[in-house]
Amino acid sequence: MNLISEDSDSFTVQSGKTLLTFTHSEKSAYYHLCFRVNEFFFDMMAERLPLLSNEQGEEIMDWKGKQAYFYDSEGNILEIVVREEVCEKRNGWFDVSEVGMPCTCVKNMQEDLNFLKDIHNGEDRMFSFYGDHHGSFVLVNQGRPWFPTQRGAEIHPLEIEIEDRIEIEFVHPVHPYKIKAKKRAEFL
């Protein structure tokens, strides 16, 4: 990914249409992020990355698209996924399509996020996607293992800027999450 900016406390990289900023913290933290790519780029990256395997020993899986998982150097659990209907024919990183958002109660978090469009209508009490085809939060109960690892999800600060049908700044009342939504061009 291209390095966009860097200073003594943070750096920003570009993943296609998404800018990711990582800020130094004295506290150890890790996250789950999923990057959309096309099939050609997926195959190229799958050859280069040390992939994680599931319980069956598979490194490349197929669930609503081809996917693979890996750790970055800081222990974040990252995923690449092929979603051709969204990635067009673009080569390389397309965007961040999922951001893990651990919480104490998935159902309550779904209610807290009801200002955002949700097409998933998740019913699982431990795990649910929340969002649309532009991007989703992966809501999981704190402590639930992040697939395909046995590492339990932990709550760490997140500041996210997204495009949606409304403009809003949301600060979660319990968890260290901030979401700033601005109007997506199709809604202007």
Image (tube, rainbow, N blue to C red):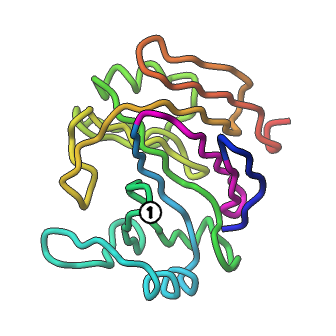
Drawn side of residue 155 relative to residue 98, left or right = left
Is 80 located above or below residue 57 in the figure?
A: above
Is 119 located above or below residue 58 in the figure?
A: above
- At horizontal 42% and vertical 20% (from top left) the residue drawn is 175
Drawn side of residue 143 relative to residue 169, left or right = left
**Front one among 168 and 160:** 160
- At horizontal 47% and vertical 68% (from top left) the residue drawn is 80
Q: Is residue 12 magenta?
A: yes
Q: Quadrant of the C terminus?
A: top right
* Amino acid at pointer 1: Asp
Per the image, label 1 sits on a secondary structure element best described as loop
Q: Position of residue 178 (x, y in %)?
A: 58, 25
The residue that mark 1 highlights is 72
Q: Quadrant of the N terminus?
A: bottom right
- At horizontal 61% and vertical 35% (from top left) the residue drawn is 160
- At horizontal 42% and vertical 34% (from top left) the residue drawn is 27
Q: Quadrant of residue 86?
A: bottom right
Q: Position of residue 161 (x, y in %)?
A: 67, 36
User: What secondary structure characterizes most of the magenta part?
Assistant: strand
Magenta part of the chain: 11-27
Query: 10 Å neighbourhood of mark 1: few (<14), some, or many (≥20)?
Result: few
